[in-house]
Amino acid sequence: MVKKTARSFVGKFLYGLLFVVLLPAFLFFWASVLDNSVYLPVPDWKPAAVLAVALGGFMVAKGMLDLVIVGKGLPMNPYPPQKFVSVGIYAWFSHPIYFGTGLLAFGLSLWFRSAGALYVLTPVLILALISLVFGYERFAIMRVFGDTARRHKPIFSLRGTIGQASSFNLETVSAIFIIGALYASALFSILGLDLSKNLFLYWLVNLMILILAVNYRSVWAVLRNLSEIIANSRRDWLFFNGKFRIINHGIYSGLAGAVAAGIMGYVIGNNLAVLVLVVCTISGGALFAQLRWGSATLLRPYGYWGAVIGGVLGMLLIKIVFGISIYQTLLAGVLCAPLAQAIGRLRCLSQGCCHGVAAPKDMGIRVWQSQSRVVVLSKMKGECIHATQTYSILFNLWLFSLLFSLWLAPAHNFSASLIVGLYFILTGVERFTEDAYRGEKQTKMAFGMQENQWIAIAALAAGVIITMLPFPPSMNALGALNFYFLGTVLLGGLITSFAMSMDFPRSKVRFSRLSG
């Protein structure tokens, strides 16, 4: 008993040291490094900074105190409170500690007038906290406190409660609005617009963001219906007595490959190297998934993180063979990846891969298509499931606009390391939440979370490290829009379409057949 108590004390001490001392210290250091990569104006708003720090500090302190006194526990995920706390500041907010942390980061960024902290660290921190809530804590709270948590509805909440997957609260909407305001401010600076002379336009953009955030249910209803149509749209064409098959979602996979080849070709300027990179990326995704999930029913699966590994190895290969800078190829890869993945996720919807777990009726989609992996492998025909593919599409479209805006900034004021690092950081943040709602049977758990969530955390950490590396300034495009470029785009699309939407349905050889 004494040894167990000692181990518990050591664990709590180390956990507190990590998140109360070491992590904040590292964030201050990261912000100082980012200031060498981000050249955007920071407003001199000292009163707003003091207010944000004071309010944020109060919320963090009060939230921790309520968990200790009322909950009889600690504000630590491994050492949760014994009782569900619904009084004090928790009667007002679902997650006051996280909300207060976001305010603290925002206020300190303004006080120190740190562009790196204001435009990069603060939005990343807020998004990471939202991801932690929706990707882990929501499930953990429900497992421990069940109906007690489900019935709790803080004063500052929109329709829904903490236990409903479809719920939003004022904290989430406020966080989205703050990030939107920062992004709009940065975009105005990138475009060379004087904020003081375009203040009406700036706040009009932010008003639109706020309206979309508050009315997310109406927006989602339209997107959900479209997702359900695509998820049930698969059609096959058979040739050579049924030995060769072309699936109609080849239009999506082909377009994704064509877009990826086009952007990479435009940035790095070597068409043959682009095709090598396309093949390496697809091969990496296929090999990774085959080793992890391959079976008699999954002869040709694909894995996103395997595609990332294959792409990195491909970059090393073309550096050796073609002498193209790793920095230029990395930049090309992260600029094309979000848009290519957003288009490719339409293929995932139609194929039924990467689908979600059961969802509330007002949130999920239903799949009846007999060849979909939702029906064939997961046996969830007609059930409401999360459209995780659509979540990914929305995120990647936003990420594409963000990274391309940074790359196209006048005089390339953002280093390649920042652009590449942000891709891995933000992808890791999004995938942590998305993978928590993934419902494929082959998904494995490790230490209370899905395996891919741990990979997402590693991607986030790798992205932070990349932002601090001494990459050269963001490079100009080297490609030319000519006949060879067009041929590369078409061939890249054909290769991707063949790999992901054409197969040999009668074969049982590895890599021969897509499911269904």
Image: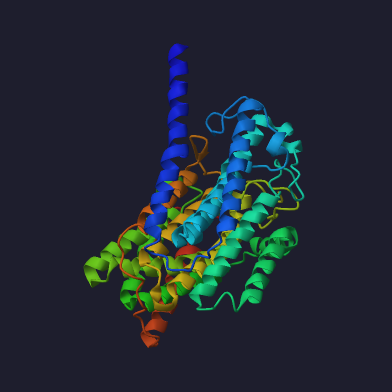
**In the rendered image, is residue 513 in sight?**
no
Q: Position of residue 10 (x, y in %)?
A: 43, 24
Q: What sort of colour scheme is used for the picture?
A: rainbow
Q: Position of residue 331 (x, y in %)?
A: 38, 68
Residue occupying the point 31% across, 67% down: 327
Q: Nearer the viewer, residue 286 or 101?
A: 101
Residue occupying the point 27% across, 62% down: 316
Q: Position of residue 465 (x, y in %)?
A: 36, 53
Q: Nearer the viewer, residue 266 or 191?
A: 191
Q: Quadrant of the C terminus?
A: bottom right
Q: Nearer the viewer, residue 431 or 469?
A: 469
Going by the picture, which residue comes out furthest to the top? 1
Going by the picture, which residue comes out furthest to the bottom? 482
Tell whether 201 sits left or right of 291. Answer: right
Going by the picture, which residue comes out furthest to the front? 47
What is the total number of numbered labels drawn onto the structure image? 0
**In the rendered image, is residue 59 in sight?**
yes
Residue occupying the point 42% across, 51% down: 459
Residue occupying the point 70% across, 32% down: 146
Q: Position of residue 395 (x, y in %)?
A: 56, 61
Q: Is residue 364 above or below residue 255?
A: above
Tell whether 155 sits left or right of 354. Answer: right
Q: Nearer the viewer, residue 36 or 322?
A: 36
Q: Is residue 194 above or below residue 95?
A: below
